[in-house]
Image: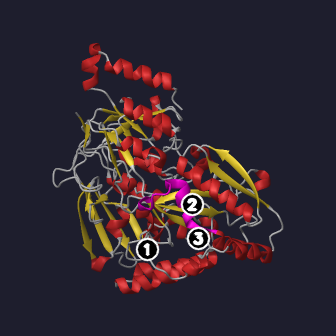
Amino acid sequence: MIPRRSLLAGAAALAAPSVARAQATRPLRFVPHANLSVVDPVASTAYITRNHGFLVWDTLYALDDGFQPQPQMLAGDRVEEDGRRWVFTLREGLRFHDGEPVRAEDCVASLMRWSRRDAMGSRLAALAEEIRALDDRRFAIRLRAPFPHMRAALGKPGSLAPFIMPARIAARDPFQPFGGAEAIGSGPFRFRADEWNPGARVAYERFDGYVPREDGAVSFLAGPKRASVARIEWTIIPDPATAAAALRAGEVDWWERVTPDLLASLRRDAALAVEIPDPLGFISTLRMNHLQPPFDNPALRRAVLPAVNQEDYMQAVMGTDRSLWRTGVGVFTPGTPLATEAGMDALRFDLERARRLVAESGYRGEPVVVLTATDVPALAALSAVGIDMLRRIGLSVEEKAMDWGSVVRSLGSREPVSRGGWSAYFSNWAGLDHVDPAGHLVLRGQGAQGFIGWPDSPRLERLREEWFEAVALAEQKLIAAAMQEQAFEDVPYVPLGQFFQPMAYRRTLRGVAQPGGIPRFWGVESA
């Protein structure tokens, strides 16, 4: 936490007439939702790392406001051989922050690294016969069968996004995060590794060598990325009251996630704007470790379902204002085409039934170690409700409290709890990530080769493959319904509800946006 005395001293200095010129070049100061502990956006699915990624790196395509992929780093593409061969051409003048040009070989290496971690990437890799550079600006992907989702895959904004990195860095193991010195991108801002102070501050500078697209308007993440501010500083302030006070005093300019208890007071401040920027909101989840007891037992995982009262979780996160949250949430984002009621009876709240199912599951009192993030209010609230729920149905819960960055690092452990492993954790996912099976990481069933938690569900994987092959929406909906029913059998995770996250910023800023829950720093101007 940043001491209040330091923040107020900084504000007093900024208010002094003698530094009027300094005010004109004052950095944009932003309060993110969590501490940035991992800078590698392929090795971590944490949204704080993904948000950092969109400042530093760029993608080949980007989604517009209609969620359609548009060329971003690309000048264009060409599809040949009935959709089985794609040729991509980079825009001229693209450079990395170290001065090296972006080459086709960098794109190939980056996509190969990304495909080893990402759901969409793994599908592409399974279909690809060859991915190779043709020359410095062109590369080609030859497929065994057409892949109509190609542009959407190479422009997906959720975790994990296919950011383009220098080939020498992309050659690294994607399961081993690289350090700050290797956070070299070609995006509109350059990461200042020498100023990175985890838990306190992250700094970025405008990359003057960045070449924005010449055509189109800024739309979601697509269009020209013109950086107006010369410097951005992320100030890590875990305490919401301190963050709100800093925003009111003008010590910071933008607070990513306002807690519900402070909404009313911030809305009354004429100097501030409070908005809910993302209509898809966030989906709260409980993720269990399928590799280790006791949640390697599917009967015990299913026993947890009737113990879930989504209203309890949503009230804990966003308070009693029902306009800020929604229950009745399954595995696909409410209000989107694949959302379904199939199998939802599994989530009908019945605590006594849950207790009975726990007893029938064969559970013998094994410890359940829950990783709890104490520095992210929404996650702390979810964890408090969830731990109480697990204890009420008879599980022996041990809470392991830490900051979110430490949770992210701890989740890679596959050890039993007796050797430092974990059993469960609570998290939030952008609704954008759960609209379909393509980028839905926690709906995968790849076992030990998959995403943390490592659920094994061959049928979920088969259904996902069928969805990729389906063309008609009606067929896709039937497959999505079957996937939801199967998810309530295998329980790769438990949906806990949907909430809509407010942000706040000073009205001296113009162009502030947070599409899909991603803070967009290009196009922001300070009066």
- The mark nearer the N terminus, 3 or 1, is 1
**Disc 3 target residue:** 446
* Mark 2 residue type: Tyr
Whole-angstrom CA distance, mark 3 to mark 1, is 17 Å
Quarter containing the N terminus: top right
Say whether residue 252 is left or right of residue 221: right
Callout 1 crowding tier (Cα within 10 Å): few <14, some 14–19, many ≥20: some
Asked whether 270 falls inside the magenta stretch, the response is no
Do the residues under discs 2 and 3 have CB atoms within 8 angstroms? no
* Mark 3 residue type: Gln
Q: Write the residue at 52% across / 52% down.
A: 43
**In this orientation, does residue 163 appear?**
no
Callout 2 crowding tier (Cα within 10 Å): few <14, some 14–19, many ≥20: many
Callout 3 crowding tier (Cα within 10 Å): few <14, some 14–19, many ≥20: some
Residues rendered magenta in the picture: 308-324
**Disc 1 target residue:** 127
Q: Write the residue at 70% across / 48% down.
A: 400
* Image quadrant in which you'd find residue 455: bottom right
